[in-house]
Image (cartoon, rainbow, N blue to C red):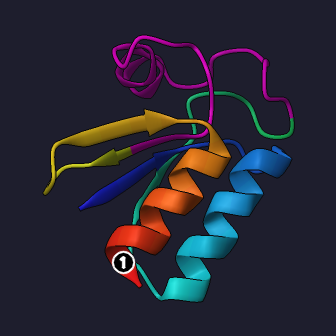
Amino acid sequence: MLELYQSEGCPHCAKVRAKLSELGVSYVAHNPRLPGDEGGDVANDVTYDELTAGGEDQIPYLVDTERGVTMYESDDIVEYLEEHYE
């Protein structure tokens, strides 16, 4: 399962969501912060804790539970998706 920690207003997150849609890959979206502000107030303490457990306070953050992979940075995530899900 793919999990994407993101914010609706973040252009970097939009890039990842577009790639997931293009590839037809199902995923679960988590919104740890208020919409529209990448550095905004925490909206969900549980998902925020999961986000920062990866080592950074940054979105987008992808978790691929089947492969045991976690990563930040939209370009790295898009490259990973192309490599493993095309």
Q: Which residue is mark 1?
A: 85
Q: State the predominant SS element of the stretch in magenta.
A: loop
Rendering coords of residue 16 (x, y %): 63, 60
Where does the N terminus fall, quadrant-wise?
A: bottom left
- Crowd rating for badge 1 (residues with CA inside 10 Å; few <14, some 14–19, many 20+): few
Query: In the rendered structure, which amino acid carries the disc numbered 1?
Result: Tyr
The stretch drawn in magenta includes residue 18: no
The stretch drawn in magenta includes residue 58: yes
Relative vertical location of residue 74 with respect to residue 55 in this rendering, above or below: below
Q: Tell me where the magenta segment starts and ends, as one range.
A: 37-62
Considering the numbered disc 1 on the image, is that residue within a helix, a strand or a loop? helix
Q: Viewer-proximal residue, 17 or 34?
A: 17
Where does the C terminus fall, quadrant-wise?
A: bottom left
Relative vertical location of residue 15 with respect to residue 84 in this rendering, above or below: above
Q: Viewer-proximal residue, 9 or 69?
A: 69
Position of 23 with respect to 18 (left or right) is left
Position of 81 with respect to 67 (left or right) is right
